[in-house]
Image (cartoon, rainbow, N blue to C red):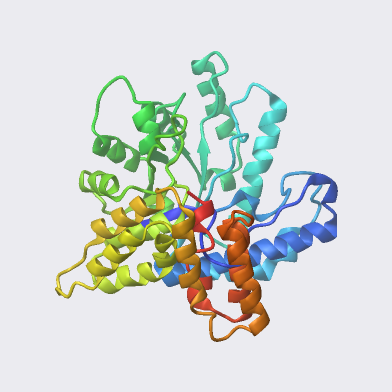
């Protein structure tokens, strides 16, 4: 079983994707963006391998304006060696990747122009995976689309247009249930008719269930029957509802208790779970740590080194409590639920100036004896401005981040301290 996340990586330098507006999309600019994005993808894969994450969804933003006439670059040949290098890294490490064309990729639209553009999008995504020399286990995920006033006709149109797709696209394409129009029973009927694997999405299922009741395991098993040997392990999508946002919105982080309840009620054999969640890799590591066979306290201590500054600036009491539970000496101690519950509780708290200042000063300790005198003086002037409300937390953290880069302060630079307060 592999647990993964989608598209972006939180708290890891050199992993951002860049884009541009259409009027700036010159060949030189596009080439530069593609080069940058491929390097970022390579950095993400290195991070995933180092942290034991072997399931990842590649961002559709990898190639800027790939299906737009503005991009006339022969990018797959131009960056042939880079694609092959990335593909070899994926294969040699037993990693599985996928891509998910966006909401405007709709092959059952009654508008022929929309269909043509959707096919171009599918061709682009397929070309990325083909350029990496990846086999058909590496998939493209697609929603069935709209109803357009007549679900029966829209379904027929999807089947007709799917059957007209190239073999190369069809060998990668999988479909999933959605939260509004096509429930898991609908997706399975279509998938079986066109011989296409079906992904079970738990949150979509909770929102949009078939009229006839069946267990989640039943639907997962039914979906499993649509996956052939050439398709690799069955994949499902797992997410949780954000209780403060509209129905179907993904939560900021995965609540571990609910995730473990879900996994305890299904068979995990030969199943890959893609998490759809705002904090991306952070939740993936959380869930991996909860289900790992080698449950040793060092896994949690490694995590704590990344979180500790972010927790300290939220709640010093919780900071001390986590320190206590990780230093408990029992050989059988693996307080994974308590650890992450405390982290989630702290991160969800409103941040006070006092707690923020506490985090800033602890983060500063690593610089105290290495920075220049003028840098130290300047920083503490900034702190006074922050205390008086004349400087934002983001601004003072940006100053710390620049110092961390300058003095190679990796403990801080590679922690979540510079990313967490903007994310949740």
Q: Name the residue: 38% across, 26% down.
A: 208
| Residue 295 versus residue 234 in the image, above or below | below
Residue 299 drawn at (x, y percent): 31, 70
Residue 80 drawn at (x, y percent): 69, 67
Query: Which quarter of the rendering shows the N terminus?
Result: bottom left
Residue 320 drawn at (x, y percent): 30, 66
Q: Is residue 51 left or right of residue 19?
A: left
Residue 96 drawn at (x, y percent): 45, 59
| Residue 122 versus residue 210 in the image, above or below | below
Q: Name the residue: 44% across, 72% down.
A: 50
- Report the residue that reaches farthest toward the top: 149
Q: Name the residue: 57% across, 68% down.
A: 43
Q: Name the residue: 37% across, 39% down.
A: 200
Q: Is residue 221 left or right of residue 201?
A: left
Q: Is residue 195 left or right of residue 214?
A: right
Q: Is residue 31 left or right of residue 230?
A: right
Q: Is residue 57 visible?
A: no
Task: Tell which of 32 and 182 is nearer to you.
Answer: 32
Q: Is residue 304 visible?
A: yes
């Amino acid at each position: 079983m592999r647990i993964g996340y989608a598209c972006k990586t939180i708290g890891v330098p050199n992993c951002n994707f860049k884009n541009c507006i259409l009027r700036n999309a010159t060949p030189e600019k596009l080439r530069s963006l593609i080069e940058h994005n491929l390097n970022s993808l390579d950095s993400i894969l290195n991070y995933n391998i180092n942290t034991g994450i072997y399931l990842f969804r590649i961002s559709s933003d990898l190639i800027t304006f790939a299906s737009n006439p503005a991009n006339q670059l022969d990018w797959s040949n131009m960056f042939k060696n880079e694609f092959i290098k990335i593909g070899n890294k994926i294969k040699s490490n037993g990693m599985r990747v996928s891509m998910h064309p966006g909401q405007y990729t709709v092959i059952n639209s009654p508008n022929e122009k929309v269909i043509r553009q959707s096919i171009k999008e599918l061709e682009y995504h397929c070309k990325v995976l083909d350029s990496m020399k990846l086999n058909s286990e590496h998939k493209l995920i697609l929603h069935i689309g709209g109803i357009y006033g007549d679900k029966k006709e829209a379904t027929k149109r999807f089947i007709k247009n799917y059957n007209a797709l190239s073999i190369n696209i069809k060998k990668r394409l999988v479909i999933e249930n959605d939260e509004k129009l096509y429930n898991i029973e609908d997706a399975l009927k279509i998938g079986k008719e066109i011989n296409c694997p079906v992904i079970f999405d738990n949150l979509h299922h909770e929102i949009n269930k078939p009229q006839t009741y069946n267990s989640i395991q039943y639907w997962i098993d039914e979906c499993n029957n649509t996956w052939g040997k050439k398709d690799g392990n069955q994949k499902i999508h797992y997410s949780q509802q954000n209780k403060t946002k509209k129905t179907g919105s993904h939560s900021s982080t995965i609540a571990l208790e609910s995730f473990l309840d879900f996994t305890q009620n299904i068979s995990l054999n030969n199943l890959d779970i893609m998490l759809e969640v705002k904090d991306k890799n952070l939740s993936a590591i959380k869930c991996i740590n909860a289900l790992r066979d080698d449950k040793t306290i060092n896994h949690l201590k490694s995590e704590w080194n990344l979180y500790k500054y972010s927790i300290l600036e939220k709640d010093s009491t919780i900071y001390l409590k986590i320190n206590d539970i990780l230093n408990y000496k029992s050989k059988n101690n693996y307080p994974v639920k308590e650890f992450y519950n405390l982290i989630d509780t702290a991160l969800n708290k409103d941040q006070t100036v006092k707690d923020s200042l506490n985090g800033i000063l602890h983060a500063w300790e690593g610089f105290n004896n290495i920075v220049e005198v003028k840098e130290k003086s300047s920083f503490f002037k900034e702190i006074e401005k922050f205390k008086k409300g004349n400087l934002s937390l983001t601004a003072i953290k940006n100053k710390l981040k620049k110092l961390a880069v300058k003095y190679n302060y990796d403990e801080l630079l590679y922690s979540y301290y510079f990313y967490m307060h903007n994310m949740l």
